[in-house]
Amino acid sequence: MLKTISRDTPLAELTLRRYEKPYTKDKRELVRKLCLSTGLLQPGDSRDIIVDILLVLIKSRNKKILMTSEDIQNETINYRKKYKLPLRGVAASNVRRQLKRLRDLYLVEKIKNDYRITEFEPLSVIFEKRIKDMYLKTIIERVKEYYDNIS
């Protein structure tokens, strides 16, 4: 008897949501909408530490600085204190988990024990080259294979 092994664990996953056009100049709100749009943050989620982690990394990109996870954690805490935001989710283990999520989406890369926005590139370039042209393309091709095999 022929037995097929089916694995329900995806090889790649990408969530995309469409929101209204950017209308604010507030950097945190723009990054928050980006995180919502790409599935890094869920609608209504109060634990939005990933927004501040990404903001810290964007700031370090502008200065071309590599940061350790501890540096990122400290800067994120300082940022949240400055803007009187609750310090939920700032534990070292959670910061590392959020960094992994950013790495999985190709926005952040790890070099030895340091992190940076991928190649210090603008996020729009990373989106075009790595997410849209590479990651999304392979997902769409595989979904098409399922459509073709069903037809």
Image (cartoon, rainbow, N blue to C red):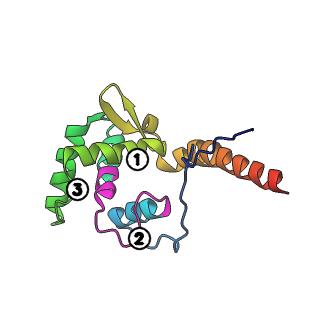
Name the residue beneath numbered marker 1.
101
Residue at (55% x, 50% y) in the render = 13
Residue at (74% x, 38% y) in the render = 2
**Image check: 40 left or right of 112?**
right
Name the residue beneath numbered marker 3.
89
- Which percent across, then down, holds residue 26? 34, 67
Q: Is residue 65 magenta?
A: no
Between 5 and 90, the one lying in front of the other is 5
Considering the numbered disc 2 on the image, is that residue within a helix, a strand or a loop? loop
Residue at (33% x, 57% y) in the render = 51
- Which percent across, then down, holds residue 69? 25, 38
- Which percent across, then down, holds residue 73? 21, 45
- Which percent across, then down, holds residue 42? 41, 65
Question: Which amino acid is tagged 3?
Answer: Gly
Question: Which amino acid is tagged 1?
Answer: Arg
Labels 2 and 3 touching (C-beta < 8 A)? no
**Image check: 68 left or right of 61?**
left
Q: Is residue 57 visible?
A: no
Considering the numbered disc 1 on the image, is that residue within a helix, a strand or a loop? helix
**48 is higher (above) or lower (below) than 4:** below
- Classify 10 Å Cα crowding around label 3: few (below 14), some (14-19), many (20 and above): some
Considering the numbered disc 3 on the image, is that residue within a helix, a strand or a loop? loop
The first of marks 1 and 3 along the sequence is 3
Question: Which amino acid is tagged 2?
Answer: Pro
| Mark 1 and mark 3: Cα distance apart in space | 14 Å
The first of marks 2 and 1 along the sequence is 2
Query: What's drawn in magenta, residue-wise?
Result: 37-54
- Classify 10 Å Cα crowding around label 2: few (below 14), some (14-19), many (20 and above): few
**132 is higher (above) or lower (below) than 116:** below
| Mark 2 and mark 3: Cα distance apart in space | 17 Å
